[in-house]
Amino acid sequence: MIEFLSSLIIQAISQFRYFAVFGLMFLESALIPVPSEVVMPFSGFVSLSGTLNFWLVVFFGTLGQITGSVFIFYVGKYEGRSLLEKYGKYILIKKKDIAHADHLFQKHGDAIVFFGRLIPVVRTFISLPAGVSKMKVSKFILYSSAGILPWTLLFAWLGVKMGESWVRLKGYFHIFDALIIGLIVLYFLLKVIRKANVRQSS
C-alpha cells in the first residue's frame, strides 16, 4: 500500500510539479495519510535536474502544510469540542482531559505547537487540539510556520543530498512513525488498564 501510494505521489509531482507539492502537503496537514518523507525528498531530488526550483519546492511545501493546518485548526475550533464532548468517551477522552488540554494550550500553546511540528505523526495532528482549545489563530500560524519551515527544508535538502538514494529515507522515517504510534497506543492502553483497576477497587 505504501509503495503504491509512493508511486502515485511521484507521478503527481512529475506531472503537476509545484501544484502537486502544495496539494500533497496540504492533504498531509489535513489529516490525509500522505507521507511527507516521500513528497519533499523526491521534490528535492527532482530539483537537481532543474525541473523544479529547490526554493520554490520549499515554499510550496511549506505553504501547503500551513494551509492544511489552518483548515484543520478551524475544524477543531468549530466542531472538535462538541464532537469530543459527545463521543470522546469512546476513545477514552473525558471532559476533564479536554479541560486539561485547554489549560496546557493557554499556558504553553506556543511551545506545544512549535515542538509538535517537529515530531513525526504528532506534527500532523497538533492542529486539531490547538483548534479545540481555541488558541489564537495568529499565534497558531506563527508557531506552526516556525516548526513547518525547518522540517520542510530539511526533507527537501535530504532529497538533494542523497540524490537517487532518497528512497532510503522512507525506511528510516517509517521506524520513527512506528515508534511514535507505539507510544500513543501504549498511552491509551495504560489508560484502559488504569480505568479497569479503578472499577475493580470501587
Image (cartoon, grey):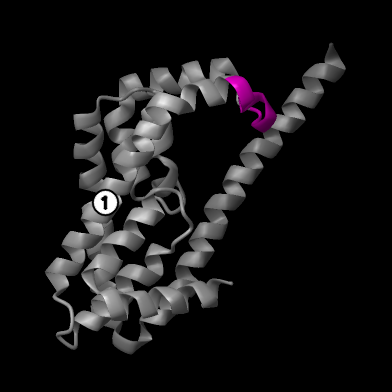
User: In the image shown, does 153 or 108 lie closer to the viewer?
Assistant: 153
Q: State yes or no: residue 5 in magenta.
A: no
| Residue at position x 13%, y 68% in the image | 55
Left or right of 136 in this view: 104: right
Quadrant housing residue 60: bottom left
Badge 1 amino acid: Ile
Where does residue 15 sit, x and y in percent of width and height?
A: 30, 80
Left or right of 158 in this view: 180: right
Write the start and end of the magenta stretch as one range.
Answer: 86-92
Decide: is 45 above or below 112. Answer: below
Label 1: few (<14), some (14–19) or many (≥20) C-alpha neighbours in 10 Å: many
Decide: is 163 above or below 30. Answer: below
User: In the image shown, does 2 or 162 lie closer to the viewer?
Assistant: 2
Q: State yes or no: residue 90 in magenta.
A: yes
Residue 17 visible? The answer is yes
User: In the image shown, does 17 or 132 lie closer to the viewer?
Assistant: 17
